[in-house]
Amino acid sequence: MTGNTAERAGPVSGGRVSPPVRRRRLGAALRRYREAAGFTIEQVAERLECSTSKISRLETAQTGASARDVRDMLLLYEVDQRALEELTSIARETRQRGWWQTYGTALTGSFVGFEAAAHTIRSYEAQCVPGLLQTEEYARCVIMAARPVPLTHAHDRVQIRLARQGVLTQDQPVEVWYVLDEAVLHRRVGGHEVMRAQLDHLRLVADLACVRLQVLPFEAGAHAGMDGSFVVLGFPDGDPDTVYVTTATGGAMHDRAEEVARYATIFAELADRALSPAASLDLIAGIGRG
């Protein structure tokens, strides 16, 4: 493994401001103020001389809003000055570039932005070691196997994955809780040496105060997580918790309260049936010696 986690922490440490999360917060606020003022999307579009699709995209965070867009909408809704200033400031933050965007087309989707802003992460992984816990060699093998891409893009994706790990060592690290299916530990990714180094790394990173790691053993039999891997992201400041569900095309984000509650319940059931953290580390060590 090249370097260490602390050396790679730079791009993500020093704050939790994330454009995707700010965009979602802004869109939700714009929708609430519009509804409170009694306007329909069509009426707002007519008054501001723009398309209804633009208003809809702003409210659903599909696109970023300019400070001018926000100011025009809030003046129409007769929002007080304090709220106007707060939301125009958030609009400017949504225009900032996340550190991961410097890698251009190597990364698509908004998960990294949400992960960077999260304060808690609860995740069940059925197939491979989670990205925040991967070694460089293991990450490279997983990326090349899962989605064939040009070598330059693969390299950038590995670097992004390693940089993401800074959330575990920054000044206010994210609190992570992982439940790994035992199959993850037995699936030999990259050969014996790569896998042994990865299992050793799991034991090391589990010593971090912000990390809780459990293994769901084969003997648990059928369980609530058999539909696949997922991540529950928790946010501060009233931002809604979000679920990221892994799919063959990269994954899908859900923030409807009933969806989040369902996955939170599934995770609790998996954690309850998994080995304790101490027993999990003993199992990892035993497999690593095999």
Image: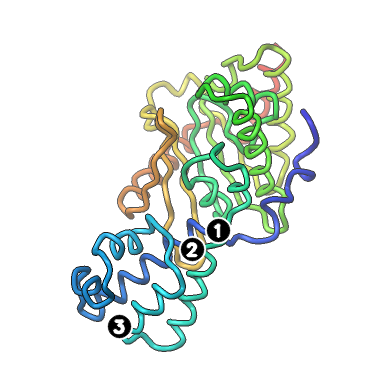
Q: Residue at x 69, y 50 (%)?
A: 11
Q: How is the image coloured?
A: rainbow
Q: Which residue is mark 2?
A: 22
Q: Is residue 177 above or below residue 134?
A: below
Determine the secondary structure under disc 2. helix
- Disc 3 versus disc 1: distance between alpha carbons? 28 Å
Which of pointers 3 and 2 indicates the residue nearer the eye? Answer: 3
Q: Position of residue 37 (x, y in %)?
A: 25, 81
- Disc 1 versus disc 2: distance between alpha carbons? 6 Å
Image quarter of residue 266: top left
Q: What kind of residue is marked 3?
A: Leu
Image quarter of residue 52: bottom left
Q: Which residue is mark 3?
A: 76
- Disc 3 versus disc 2: distance between alpha carbons? 22 Å
Q: Residue at x 44, y 40 (%)?
A: 267
Q: Position of residue 92 (x, y in %)?
A: 52, 69
Q: Is residue 151 above or below residue 90?
A: above
Determine the secondary structure under disc 1. loop
Q: Which residue is mark 1?
A: 18
Which of pointers 3 and 1 indicates the residue nearer the eye? Answer: 3
Q: What kind of residue is marked 1?
A: Ser
Location of the C terminus (image quadrant): top right
Q: Position of residue 256 (x, y in %)?
A: 32, 53
